[in-house]
Image (spheres, coloured by chain):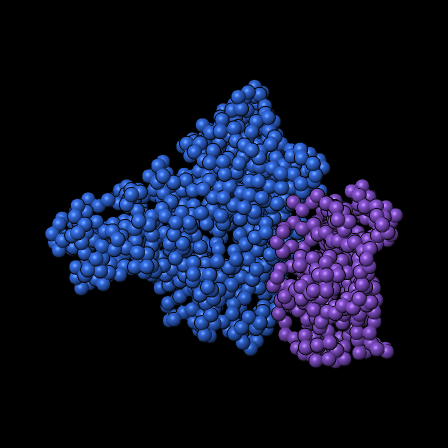
């Protein structure tokens, strides 16, 4: 690990100034410290935000929904009584994140900002690793875990968060703050808008302006007619990254779907919203056939690379099973 | 006459019972100190600069900036400019500094220039025309053609067309003719044009075709023939404690090393030569080790570097433990093994013919040849192996070298043939057990036990689970064998006049229960409790004992301990006999007492008996092997049967193991509990390589892409299912003597799980690990092609 400065402010107004040009925010540190030890990133200064109390806490109000402070750990989030009661799909997804040790340290804010697991990136070859003659290493090399959607390039990695697809399906918003920004300094945007597909090595996969930090995530109150579920296809039952994930939120009108959100994880450089899959569900009642039709719609635009065709099959299975599970029907999976 | 043979069941207070390992508490409580934990005052941190290229030549090394850095105590070039490097991660420069971060800074300050050379990392099926060579023919090419019985006209034409890149002298040509090369071919060599060899060497090295019987005729007349593609990818050892060593020089002539090793007695000879000091001046220490699996016999270049750096730093201790990524890249690899197989049986289901074209890689050296066909001596065979030289860290022995690959290639082909003949594989294999030679009876005993523990008859179905829904369940089985005769071992057993007993042996306990079985044998022989014995191992100053490899430790250490304990007991009897008014041979040592067999009332407590020794303790050396003290207490050649019950999700290709059954023989079981633990560990390791493990090399950079424990997956507790272990004991087993157990149970899980998956989903997934990509591809195309 290279030398770095360390600062530990107690209020969020100081963060932007302290971050400067080459600083990084340190929260749980489960991702950042590993990246630093592997010499993938080398921030000159770490700004520890764990002493900023306003970033903590989870609260629920019937009218406003759920507010999750950025410093909430995944374990606190998974165990929160309101989360379990009003958003069981979120609690379940949080319980599947990584390992108990990591859940005790990792934060919600960090979960949104974690860097991709692409092995070219993690082995220090760059997020858009290139060969000596300028070709994509991912395309020329081993891309078994790479994107099947949103993979026009040069980004081929997959978005690593398993919570983001669920939150996006539920209509969550993210609040960002920078003392340098105009007005209150707070910027609120739909969570999905905070993820972007970078076009060059210098860009990030997050829409965070210099000096900006995640302060909280808000989830609208669930309606009476909401049915939601998420499904992860994982090779191991123990700690593992999903090979594909689908999160769905269905607004029901009797037995028919009034509106739907279908969000795929681990298949694209961003959490992948599939309006095609949602459209395939609207007006239909949920059955294996309608779920399968939506699953097919979700991957209709998918383009496999040389080693990852199987991920299309997995994404389909995930979408179908998430939909059936949301509707309380047996998906027949989970060997 | 001393009775060295193992005691009868009736007189074994401890031997063959269920005893918890003696070092369990110290390990579970974290008090056990591993090499990793050796952190004396003044310890310097060692780090290695590694070559990032898979194939390169070192052009220049400039370490001047590093040498000047504050806190840097020594810099040592490990491979000088001009050296050709054959894999990414090979060692170039070593550094010792006051702490790890300073050492890392120093590594980054070293400037190495490389000439990058082309690399080759693929172990895909070799092309069929690798014999055809458009460039001049090398000596290897020529001898390869002769070995493979290429027709003489073809060899001559090839020599005329291409020329040769070697200059055969008269002696070579004469020897060639004497060894059967046709005179016309020799004449062609003599007349051949010489040409410079092509710079790019072929990565493929073929063995001669081995033939026995008449395979062509046997295949033609067979009732059923099955053809298939099988194999397993390269994996690593993935030791939980990475490789490492700490060195210090108490004087400029004496070296002390702490090392994570399977070969405590064998380290000093390997360290003395490169350092130029007598082996006797080197003390090697290790109490506990976090896994070796065959990868820790050598001090390795980084270990030697700790001694060199320590010397350069004035003798201060220097320690290098490999980082996880280096461990995965360079510190251990099991060769891949793949094959196209054709196998045939007659109408009664008797195996009659085998043909295989196998290949695999074990790094630059090419790798070993799996013993094909495995277990079954099929009468008619034709086989050839192609070793592929690839730019990756060299293969090391991985539990049961070459056997898991052989099982994965053979037991799968047999299961496919049984399926083709509509036979239950248990019946098919039972009907062919006469082909398994001396282990036939063992397998005949074991198969019904395994079948009952698995409830095979009730659960097994013909290929393809026809039940509705995407989850398919299936059963599979595999058989295995191994040698396991005890290695050379010396044991010093001392009885002190106060009754305490001390044993010294320069062996190591890899977590297998080695400590426990030594103490069981000694305590059982002397009739005293385990805690009456002080066992000292892990120091090269103790009597020499062999390396722990090839399942040789149990047989070795128990044999030498038994002989030492029997002799010590008999000498004690001689001292005690007068006091008990008996002859020494009339005495026995039981229940912490020495007494007259025919009259137990004439007895001395152990302590009282030992007081008769006199003022000085008595030390007895026991040895293995020892022809002067028959019988042989160890043996070789075990048999085991394993069965797997799996569920496969046919929509995702995810495989889950529901249950594994292992029935295992290892001769006389010294401790049933640690033996079962050894088998359980092997099953878990087997599930890992069957489903998850794969050393993935990047075709573009030649580097390992998953040198971590994230995408190099190992089974977690949630992945291993139920496991049932049955150890064979009693008549037919006990009297064979002690045989090691480390290798055999890890051979079969891959084949058994692969067979269970085929039974579940109806098609063969050719290669391990059985990843979702491979399972789905097999389902799509009927199992005829191999995925990545």
Look at the picture and state if B725 lies above or below B157: below
Measuring from the top left, give residue B191's x and y in whole percent.
56, 33
| Screen quadrant of the N terminus of chain B | top left
Q: Residue at x 49, y 31 (%)?
A: B376
Relative side of B782 to B221, left or right: right
Measuring from the top left, give residue B244's x and y in whole percent.
49, 61
Judge by depth and name the residue closer to the eye, B452 or B229: B452
| Screen quadrant of the C terminus of chain B | top right
Q: Residue at x 59, y 59 (%)?
A: B325
Farthest top residue?
Answer: B221
Relative side of A102 to A255, left or right: left
Chain B colour in the picture: blue
Judge by depth and name the residue closer to the eye, B85 or A42: A42
Q: Residue at x 30, y 53 (%)?
A: B523
Chain A colour in the picture: purple
Look at the picture and state if B284 lies above or below A47: above
């Amino acid at each position: 690990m290279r030398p770095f400065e360390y600062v530990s402010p107690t209020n969020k107004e100081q963060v932007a100034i302290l971050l400067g040009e080459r600083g990084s925010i340190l929260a749980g540190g489960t991702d950042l410290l590993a990246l630093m030890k592997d010499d993938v990133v080398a921030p000159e200064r770490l700004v520890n935000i764990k002493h900023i109390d306003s970033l903590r806490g989870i609260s629920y109000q019937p009218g406003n929904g759920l507010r999750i402070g950025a410093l909430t750990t995944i374990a606190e989030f998974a165990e929160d009584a309101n989360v379990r009661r009003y958003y069981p799909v979120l609690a379940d997804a949080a319980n599947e994140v990584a390992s108990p040790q990591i859940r005790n340290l990792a934060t919600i804010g960090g979960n949104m900002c974690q860097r991709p697991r692409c092995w070219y990136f993690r082995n220090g070859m760059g997020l858009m690793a290139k060969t000596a003659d300028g070709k994509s290493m991912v395309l020329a090399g081993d891309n078994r875990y790479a994107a099947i959607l949103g993979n026009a390039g040069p980004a081929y990695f997959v978005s690593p968060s398993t919570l983001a697809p669920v939150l996006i399906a539920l209509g969550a918003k993210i609040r960002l703050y920078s003392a340098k920004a105009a007005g209150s300094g707070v910027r609120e945007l739909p969570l999905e808008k905070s993820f972007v597909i970078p076009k060059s090595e210098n860009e990030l996969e997050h829409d965070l302006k210099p000096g900006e930090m995640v302060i909280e995530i808000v989830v609208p109150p669930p309606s009476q007619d909401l049915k939601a579920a998420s499904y992860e296809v994982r090779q191991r039952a123990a700690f593992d990254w999903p090979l594909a994930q689908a999160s769905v939120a269905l607004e029901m009108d009797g037995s028919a779907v009034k509106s739907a959100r279908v969000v795929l994880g681990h298949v694209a450089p961003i959490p992948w919203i599939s309006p095609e899959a949602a459209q395939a569900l609207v007006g239909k009642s949920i059955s294996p056939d309608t779920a399968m039709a939506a699953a097919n719609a979700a991957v209709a635009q998918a383009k496999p690379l040389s080693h990852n065709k199987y991920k299309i099959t997995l994404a389909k299975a995930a979408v179908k099973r998430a939909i059936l599970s949301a509707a309380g029907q047996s998906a027949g999976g989970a060997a | 006459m001393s009775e060295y043979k193992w005691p009868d069941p009736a007189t074994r207070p401890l031997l063959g019972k269920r005893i918890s390992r003696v070092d369990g508490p110290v390990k579970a409580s974290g008090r056990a100190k591993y090499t990793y934990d050796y952190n004396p005052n003044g310890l310097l941190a060692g780090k290695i600069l590694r070559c990032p290229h898979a194939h390169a030549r070192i052009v220049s090394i400039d370490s001047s900036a590093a040498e000047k850095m504050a806190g840097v105590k020594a810099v040592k070039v490990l491979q000088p400019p001009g050296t050709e490097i054959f894999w990414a991660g090979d060692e170039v420069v070593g550094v010792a500094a006051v702490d790890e971060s300073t050492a890392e800074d120093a590594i980054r300050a070293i400037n190495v220039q490389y000439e990058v050379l082309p690399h080759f990392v693929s172990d895909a099926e070799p092309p069929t025309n690798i014999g055809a060579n458009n460039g001049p023919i090398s000596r290897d090419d020529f001898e390869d053609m002769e070995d493979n019985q290429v027709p003489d006209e073809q060899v001559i034409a090839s020599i005329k067309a291409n020329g040769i890149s070697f200059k055969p002298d008269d002696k070579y040509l004469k020897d060639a003719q004497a060894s059967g090369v046709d005179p016309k071919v020799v004449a062609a060599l003599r007349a051949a044009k010489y040409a410079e060899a092509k710079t790019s060497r072929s990565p493929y090295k073929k063995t001669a075709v081995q033939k026995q019987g008449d395979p062509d005729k046997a295949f033609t007349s067979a009732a059923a023939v099955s053809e298939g593609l099988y194999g397993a990818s390269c994996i690593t050892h993935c030791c939980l404690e990475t490789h490492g060593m700490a060195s210090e020089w108490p004087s400029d002539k004496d070296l002390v090393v702490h090392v994570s090793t399977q070969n405590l007695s064998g380290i000093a000879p390997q360290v003395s030569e490169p350092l130029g000091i007598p082996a006797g001046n080197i003390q090697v220490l290790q109490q506990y080790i976090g896994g070796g699996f065959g990868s820790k016999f050598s001090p390795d270049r980084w270990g030697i570097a700790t001694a060199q750096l320590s010397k350069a730093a004035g003798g201060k201790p220097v320690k290098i433990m490999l980082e996880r990524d280096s461990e995965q890249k360079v510190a251990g690899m099991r060769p891949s093994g793949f094959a196209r197989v054709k196998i045939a049986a007659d109408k009664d289901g008797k195996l009659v013919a085998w043909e295989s074209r196998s290949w695999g890689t074990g790094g630059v050296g090419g790798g070993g040849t799996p013993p094909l066909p495995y277990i079954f001596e099929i009468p008619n065979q034709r086989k050839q192996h192609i070793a592929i030289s690839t730019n990756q860290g060299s293969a090391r022995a991985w539990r049961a070298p070459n056997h898991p690959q052989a099982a994965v290639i053979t037991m799968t082909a047999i299961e496919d043939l049984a399926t083709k003949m509509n036979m239950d594989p248990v019946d098919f294999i039972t009907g062919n057990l006469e082909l398994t030679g001396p282990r036939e009876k063992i397998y005949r005993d074991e198969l019904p036990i395994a079948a009952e523990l698995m409830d095979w008859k009730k659960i097994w179905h013909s290929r393809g689970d026809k039940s509705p829904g995407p989850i398919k369940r299936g059963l599979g089985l595999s058989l295995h064998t191994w040698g396991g005769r005890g290695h050379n071992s010396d044991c010093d057993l001392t009885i002190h006049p106060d009754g305490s007993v001390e044993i010294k042996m320069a062996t190591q306990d890899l977590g297998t229960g080695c400590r426990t079985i030594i103490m069981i044998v000694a305590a059982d022989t002397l009739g005293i409790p385990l805690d009456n014995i002080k066992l000292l191992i892990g120091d090269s100053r103790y009597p020499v004992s062999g390396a722990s490899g090839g399942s040789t430790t149990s047989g070795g250490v128990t044999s030498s301990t038994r002989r030492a304990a029997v002799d010590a007991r008999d000498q004690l009897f001689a001292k005690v006999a007068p006091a008990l008014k008996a002859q020494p041979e009339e005495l026995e040592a039981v229940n912490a007492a020495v007494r007259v067999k025919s009259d137990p009332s004439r007895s001395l407590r152990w302590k009282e008996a030992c007081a008769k020794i006199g003022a000085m303790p008595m030390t007895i050396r026991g040895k293995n092997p020892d022809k002067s003290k028959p019988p042989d207490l160890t043996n070789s050649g075990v048999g085991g049967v394993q069965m797997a019950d799996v569920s496969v999700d046919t929509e995702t290709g995810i495989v889950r193991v529901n249950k594994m059954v292992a029935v295992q023989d290892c001769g006389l079981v010294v401790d049933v509990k640690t033996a079962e633990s050894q088998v359980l560990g092997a099953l878990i390791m087997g599930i890992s390589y069957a489903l998850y493990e794969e050393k993935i090399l990047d075709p573009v950079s030649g580097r390992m892409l998953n040198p971590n424990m994230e995408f190099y997956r190992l089974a977690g507790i949630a992945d291993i299912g139920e496991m049932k272990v049955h150890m064979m004991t009693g008549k037919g087993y006990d009297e064979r003597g002690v045989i090691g157990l480390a290798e055999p149970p890890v051979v079969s899980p891959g084949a058994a799980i692969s067979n269970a998956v085929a039974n579940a989903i109806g098609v063969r997934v050719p290669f391990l690990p059985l990843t979702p990509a491979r399972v789905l591809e097999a389902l799509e195309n009927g199992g005829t092609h191999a995925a990545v």
